[in-house]
Structures are given as structure tokens and as C-alpha cells.
Amino acid sequence: MATYDLIIRNGNVVLPHEVKKTDIAIKNGIIVAIEEGITATSKDEKNAAGYYIFPGMIDIHVHFNDPGRDEWEGFESGSQMIAAGGGTTFFDMPLNGIPSTTDSQALLNKAEMGESKSVVDFALWGGLVPGNILELKGLADNGAIGFKAFLSESGNEEFERVDDLTLIAGMKEIASLKKILALHAESAAMTDFLTKEKVTNGQLTADDYLASRPIAAEVEAVERAIAYARITGCPLHFVHISSEEAILKITAAKAMGLDITVETCAHYLLFNHNDLQDKGAVAKCAPPLRKVEEQEKLIRLLIEGAIDMVSSDHSPSPYLLKDPTVHHLFSAWGGISGGQFTLLALIELAITYDIPFYKVAALIAGNPADRFNLNTKGHIEVGKDADLTWISLEESFTVAEKNFFAKHKHSLYMERTFPCAVKLTMNNGVVVFEDGQLVNMRNRGHWLKPEQTKMGTSS
């Protein structure tokens, strides 16, 4: 009888603190050995010579819109896209489904849908909105990975932004539940005022949109949330931060001992305001793409370790909602469709700026797993789930409609060429993507429900 189900041989394995050419043995979906020249028998072998093997990407910030808006993106197409990008786990945000995930029944209904459709593992955010504080405990008890709130308008009438009283009361409750609050941090007072002023005056250019969501709006919201965290003890995670000033405020709060982590997104690192000017609404997001100088500052902060993780904030829509013949820039849907490209983007940056691959692995897998207490995920180690991604540096990948697995093919990333390609994605020992094709489509991911979110893991 074979000792193992699979041995992967000769890969350049991206371990937590080094890259090492070695073999990996897998049994029952678990990594059971990592060593050179494994001699035991196995049912199958794969030769990974020349490939870099990363832990499967964990994208903690996607919008798949199931149920209710799956014509935008659903668990089926969204999870396939994640797999094609080297992802093995995603966290779905609570706002764009109908109903939004703001009570236990909505959470359980969404989970059932995810378990029936997703080809990789997933977790689900619950929402904090005005009027649902009494629902938070039920959401936590039933498996929400954490909570999400908006300090500015969400763009979705079903998911209201929090007022200050809801925010501080919700943070106190979330702290008592030992969970994390993720925040879209832009000041509603500033963005609403500036947006109304621009639209009223017919100032609808890319420059006007950037001016309507200034760095000052991000910084004010970050500072306010940090002040409330000092009072309530609530752990915070700031999503899609786009500016150096906001990152420095968060870094200072960490130094004071507050339990805070921060993400940015691949599009803030690869693109800038010039792309919004050139491409229009396909490059619209909130916060907006910043000017080149700010993009360069973010990259420096990433290199210096001031950013904990990188996500996609995959936020797709049908083309009609971005069509320039129908919408001006302010009324078009604000979201970037790009969940397939986060790992490729980080590897491109690593090659360009000489960032060690093990640091890339931490940004896209290790740190998310540690922060959200996914104890079997995020690292290539004995005892962890066999969530693995093979990357080729000998091939390039040019984004095109035929190889972009999202439901809608319009994307800021279209026609971009990456200096690397995803060869294979394995979730719990099952190959779900290989050589440009989705495979084993009957595989279904697991709903991940940690018993308690890990505290005090900010770095």
C-alpha cells in the first residue's frame, strides 16, 4: 500500500522564511512531509522542477454578490477565477448580495450557496450597519470571520454606512465577541460634500473624481476609528488603504499597542491616476487610484513591511454600469475587477524590487491566515492543508478575455502582461486549475469557521 497520496518533487518551495528546493508529500489533503529526496511510495507523483511553489493565496476581500446579484459575479464564476489566479481561499464581503449579510439567517443562506457552488474554500464576513448591533453575536456564533462597516457610502442602498454612534457601539460589541472589524475608511462628510459640489458644477473628469475623494478623507476616517478603538479595545483591519499618510497613522497606532492590521490592493500598487484618465470607469474605485508619487510611496511601504497583506477587492459589475455612453465617471459603478491577478501582481513587484518570495507568501497567505486564525492555512508546513500554487517564471501571462475567468471580462488589467504565470492550483490536495484550464470542477470548497479570531497579531 502506498504511503502517500501524492509526492511533489523538485519544486522551489516558498517556506515561511526561505525558498528551498525540496519535495512535498500529501495524504488526505494534508501536507505530511517536506524533505529532500522522499523515498516512500505514493499513489501519484508530480515533478515541479523549475516551478516556485507558493502557499495558496488567501484573498480576504472579494465581492461575489451571491445571492441576489450573481449576474455581477457569483460563487461559481468567482471561485473559479480565484483558483485560476492561484487562490485557494477567499473571504466574501457582506454588502452586495440581496439580502446583505447582516443577520444569522442571511449568513447561513449564503454559506449554503457557497458550499454548493465554490470550487475552493471560503469564509464570510458579517456586516455592521445601523440597527443590527443585536445581530452581531448571532453572526459571530454562526461562523462570520469578522465584520465589515463603511464610514462612507457603500454604493449599495441595502448596506448603509455606519454613523458614529453605531460605529462605537458596534466596536464595543465586536470586541466582546473577540472578532475583528474591517473598515472602509473614508470620511462620508468630506466625500459627500465634495462629490455633490463636483456633480452640481458639472465637473466630471478623472481629476475631479480624484479631488472628490482626497487623502484627507481617508486619513480622517482612519484617525477616528483608531480613537474609537482606544476606547473600545476593538481589533481593526483597514481595507484597501491607498495613501502613505494613512499607513503612517496606522503604524503609529500599532506602536501604541493597538490591535490593528492593514491591507492595500494590487491595483494601488500597479496602477495610478493616469490609468483612470486613460481608461475611464473601468479604473474607477474608492478610494481612487492615486497619483504616481503616492503609488511609489505605497510600494516603498510594502517593501518596508508597513503593509500586512494585499487583497484584490474584486468588485465587478455588468458592463452597463460602467458604460461611458450611459454613465459619467461619478455615476458609474466604482469597483475594480481583478481577483485573478493579485498573486501575479505581487510576484511582478517582487521581481522588479527584489522582494523575497517568502515575503510575498506572507502578504498573500501567511499573514491573512494568522490574523484570522485559519490554523491549517497560509503556510507550507507539515500538518497544514495542501493548498499550493505553482508559479512559472519562464512564462509570461497576458490578460485577455479568453483567460480571465470572471463573469464579466472588462477589467483594468486587460492586456497587461505579467512576467510569470500560474501553472497549477491545489486546494486541500485536489488540483482545481492546471495549464490554463479549470479541472475537477465537482470539487467543492469548505466554509471556514474559526472558533475565535486570533488577537494581537498585527505586525
Image (tube, grey):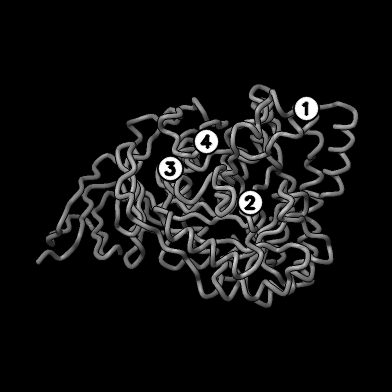
Q: Earlier in the sequence, mark 2 or mark 4?
A: 2
> Mark 2 — residue?
96
Query: Residue at 33% across / 55% down in the picture?
Result: 443
> Mark 1 — residue?
207
The amino acid type, in three-letter code, at marker 3 is Gly
Eye-nearest disc, 2 or 3: 2
Eye-nearest disc, 1 or 4: 4
Location of residue 302 in the rendering, given as x and y in whole percent from the top left corner: 58, 45
Left of 334 or right of it: where is 384? left
Q: Nearer the viewer, residue 262 or 433?
A: 433
The amino acid type, in three-letter code, at marker 4 is His
Task: Report the Cα–Cα distance between label 2 and label 3.
Answer: 22 Å
How many callouts does the rendering have? 4
Query: Residue at 69% across / 49% down in the picture?
Result: 247
Query: Residue at 45% across / 28% down in the picture?
Result: 400
The amino acid type, in three-letter code, at marker 1 is Asp
Task: Report the Cα–Cα distance between label 2 and label 1.
Answer: 28 Å
Against 138, is 3 above or below? above
> Mark 3 — residue?
85
Look at the image and tell me in which quarter the N terminus lies: bottom left
